[in-house]
Image: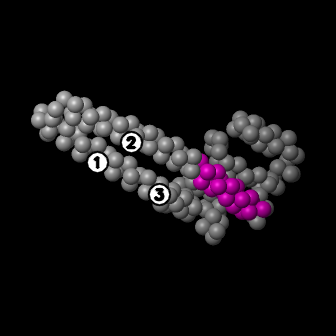
Amino acid sequence: MSKILKSVMLAALVTLAPSTQAADLKVGYVQVDKILQDAPQTAESGKKLEREFSPRSQELDRMAKQIKDLENVLDKEGLTLSEAERRNKERDVQNIKIEFQRKQRELREDINLRKNEELGSLQDRINKAVQSVSEAEGYDLVVYSGVAYASKKIDITDKVLKTLGKK
């Protein structure tokens, strides 16, 4: 649902409700960016991804060192090598560079896919925590993302973070 549509719906709800019902309306607000930054699951997810992709990252580091070492050898021995040997070494370095770039690109793509999966999972947990806090405390409406202003007295972000910390 678009942010504008949510805002219009909120305004319509508050405006159209009879004044006695509007006075009983309990509204809350959640700062999603703060939750994404402070939730314990965010740090867990980062560590999980680091462990998962660390071997491939280390392999890329080794390849980068290998390329640098081969280029240094080629620079030092380039004048003493025959033309054919020099071309072969240059071709070898170029092939390793191409392989390095391919693996680097694949790693970036895989990391992005996994980050998106982890973020989706975290968003589900956040939604469940928001729903849990909202139901437990009797909120009629809880809004997050796309809010221009929300008073601190309706901010339930810390309560949601507390609920996330329990899980």
Indicate left or right for 14 with 45 as reference: right
Q: Residue at the spot x=77%, y=52% of the render?
A: 141
Q: Which mark sits nearer the N-terminus, 2 or 3?
A: 3
* Foreground residue among 166 and 157: 166
Are dots 2 and 1 in contact, CB under 8 Å?
no
For the residues carrying marks 1 and 3, which lies nearer the camera in this image?
1
Q: Which mark is residue 65?
A: 1
- For label 2, the SS is helix
The one nearer the camera, 62 or 139, is 62
The picture places residue 30, in percent across and down from the top left corner, at 65, 53
What amino acid is labelled 1 in the image?
Lys
Magenta part, dominant SS: helix
Say what secondary structure mark 3 lies in. Answer: helix
Q: Nearer the viewer, mark 2 or mark 3?
A: 2
Query: Which is nearer the N-term, disc 2 or disc 1?
Result: 1
The residue type indicated by label 2 comes to Phe
Q: Which residue in the protein does label 3 denote?
A: 50
Residue hosting label 2: 100
| Few, some or many residues within 10 Å of mark 3 (<14, 14–19, 20+) | few
Write down the region rendered in magenta.
116-135
Rendered position, 91 above or below 43: above
Q: How many marks?
A: 3
Q: Residue 93: tell me if it is visible.
A: yes
Q: Residue at x 86, y 45 (%)?
A: 17
Q: Position of residue 117 (x, y in %)?
A: 61, 51
Q: Is residue 119 magenta?
A: yes
